Image: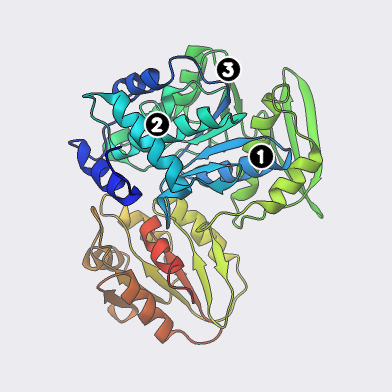
Amino acid sequence: MRFSALTDWLAWQESLHPSTIELGLERVAAVWHRLHPKPPAFLVITIGGTNGKGSSVAMLDSILRAAKYRTGVYTSPHLLRYNERIRLDGREIDDASLLESFARIDRARGDISLTYFEFGTLAALDIFARANVQVAILEVGLGGRLDAVNILAADVALVTTVDIDHSQWLGNSREEIAFEKAGIYRPNLPAIYGSAEVPTSLREHAASIGANLYCYGEDFGIHRVTTGWDWWGKIAGEEMFHHDLPLPALRGSSQLQNAAGILMVLTVLAEQLPVSTDDICAGLQAVSLAGRFQLQAGAVTHVLDVAHNPQAARELASNLAALPAGGRTLAVVGMLQDKDINTSLAALEGLIDHWYLASLQVLRGASAVQLAIALEAIAVPGEAITLCENVTSALTQARTGAQPGDRIVVFGSFYTVAEALVQPA
């Protein structure tokens, strides 16, 4: 074994490949077939999209575990520990299993160079295959068509939403990005789109390969009722319903839409993975996921949200506006410089009383000055802005300036929220 500690393996993986991100399936698929020449025995559910992937994965896993299925879950990025990325039956993978899988991949790859993400993807799939899971739930890392998880054909693929993000890799228009995300769809298999306004390129790609496309608002959807919500769907003209479902334990206005997409996934897989309405209710009530409009109560409420692109920022703004009035709203913000900073921050215009801008001390991290320039463009006054050296400093200053009844909103990046999670209020 090349290394005996997880930290050493991860540091080495970060420097193994010439570039941090290289989309493409040839290298990673070659290594996978050396490890596992036969198709996997487990069902594969792949979830992509601009936003809502993590929440959808968490809800689906929670429901399937309530139905007593053995699940494997692969997500990225992580917040506090690399082990969060791979879960068996809801439990984070242990270091020993990761080390063993990394060593197997290292032996199998020969002279093939892999990125950090590709190494992790192969480890997850290898662990799932050897653990005999019944279903693997895979979150796309970037795009879809050329993302490493796409080396496995999904028995059903869900694209949650499409908006502008990662333009340098996926394209500058919603239609270009939608085509890349639709690359996880497969011929003659269920393909689900989980939000309104279906991109033309996604619809056309699904039709061109003969995928069975089901779209939110057309083939399935929700009705709000006094006690919760109802789900409806239809397949080949046959209508089906789930009545009086509880609201998901995850907060935020988009979570019902995410849940609707997940119930469509379960509906098209009903023969292979039957679940009851009771399982659905139990899973929705038990689900948890850090950093998605996560509220920490106290004299000063903390709101933690990994929103890092315009669509997610608009969602955050909507959720903040729905909170009870009272007190000031202070923002702690740190972002990556390759994100659409201007549009993302503009989405919160009028909702923030004071901005604590943090220089993000990571590769690609934006400086506090860059964030301030974006706020100046929407005429935020200088006295409402505090520049901070890092997230820790920004959080400390925000807490010092806060009064009982105020709220502190931490957002902009997984890195930003991770800092807040290790510094509890």
- Is 68 located above or below residue 289 in the figure? above
Q: SS for tag 3? A: loop
Which residue has dot 2 on it? Answer: 122
Neighbourhood count class around disc 3 (C-alpha, 10 Å): few under 14, some 14–19, many 20 upward: some
Task: Tell me residue 340's x, y (percent).
Answer: 32, 51
Image coordinates of residue 138 in percent, x first then y, are 50, 34
Marks 3,2: beta carbons within 8 A? no
Q: Nearer the viewer, residue 183 or 134?
A: 134
Q: Do the residues labelled 1 and 2 touch (CB within 8 Å)?
A: no
Q: Which residue is drawn at 34% across and 79% down?
A: 384
- Against 16, is 245 above or below? below
Residue 171 visible in the picture: no
Instruction: Answer with mark 1 or mark 2, whichever residue precedes in sequence.
Output: 2
**CB under 8 Å between callouts 1 and 3?**
no
Q: Name the front one of labels 1 and 2.
A: 2
Q: Which of marks 3 and 2 is in front?
A: 2
